[in-house]
Image (spheres, helix red, strand yellow):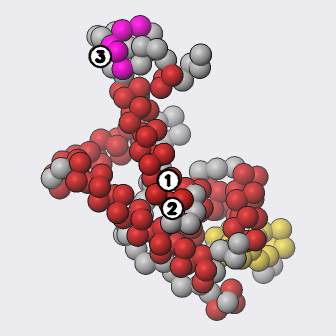
Amino acid sequence: MSDTPADHPSAGEGTGPASAPSGRVPVAVALWKTAQPLIRGFDALLLENGASWQVWHILLALSTNPPRTQRELAGAVGIREATLTHHLRAMEDNGLITRTRAPGNRRVQQVQVTDAGARLFSRLRDAAVTFDQRLRTVIGSEDDIARFLDVLGRLAAAAPEGGRDILPEDWPHEPEPPAAAAR
């Protein structure tokens, strides 16, 4: 049996090693058990609209602040450059992005969204907005949503890596048009 919180036999039962000393479910366990089905549901919705969560996240980062180097993009997405390279190769093969050498430094690759990538991003953004509206409906009032987002922000800031902003403040925004050179 795995030692992950979701697989632990006492996860959510209030007893055993996964339980807090007071008998309450640990916040980390509740967060894990909530996040997993939400992530799977969001990924399924994105797949129905043409791409995986990973492609969505890369397109979101590129549409927020283009053009980016692969290193900057890896940091924004929160994955290793080697892992990002795998995704970018597939996205480039599918015509969603272009990679070009940076002027003055041939070792640096800049990544830009193509017209096809911008169209896919628009579809995925619409799906993400729909998913977000479902979540907001479940959470409740705007005050409830503000409190919920505040708590999530505090949890992210308390995380060992110090957390990251997941979405830009201007969410949902229009994708940046591809550079003329990428057309």
Q: Which residue lies under the disc numbered 1?
A: 44
In the rendered structure, the answer to whether residue 139 lies left or right of residue 83 reads: left
Give the amino acid at mark 1. Answer: Ala
Q: Residue at x 36, y 58 (%)?
A: 131
| Residue 132 against residue 35 in the figure, above or below | below
- Looking at the magenta stretch, what is its main secondary structure? loop
User: Residue 104: horizontal and vertical position, in percent?
Assistant: 80, 79
Q: Residue at x 54, y 59 (%)?
A: 47
> For the residues marked 1 and 3, what is the alpha-carbon distance in whole angstroms?
32 Å
Q: Which of the two residues, 164 or 89, is positioned nearer the viewer here?
A: 89
Give the amino acid at mark 3. Answer: Arg
In the rendered structure, the answer to whether residue 65 lies left or right of residue 157 reads: right
Spot the residue most to the right: 106
> For the residues marked 1 and 2, what is the alpha-carbon distance in whole angstroms?
6 Å
The magenta span reads 12-16
> For the residues marked 3 and 2, what is the alpha-carbon distance in whole angstroms?
38 Å
The quarter of the displayed image where residue 157 is located: top left
| Residue 179 against residue 3 in the figure, above or below | below
Residue 48 shows which numbered tag?
A: 2
Q: Which residue lies under the disc numbered 3?
A: 24
Residue 162 appears anywhere in the view:
yes
Give the amino acid at mark 2. Answer: Glu
Q: Residue at x 64, y 92 (%)?
A: 180
State yes or no: discs 1 and 2 in contact (Cβ < 8 Å).
yes
The quarter of the displayed image where residue 28 is located: top left
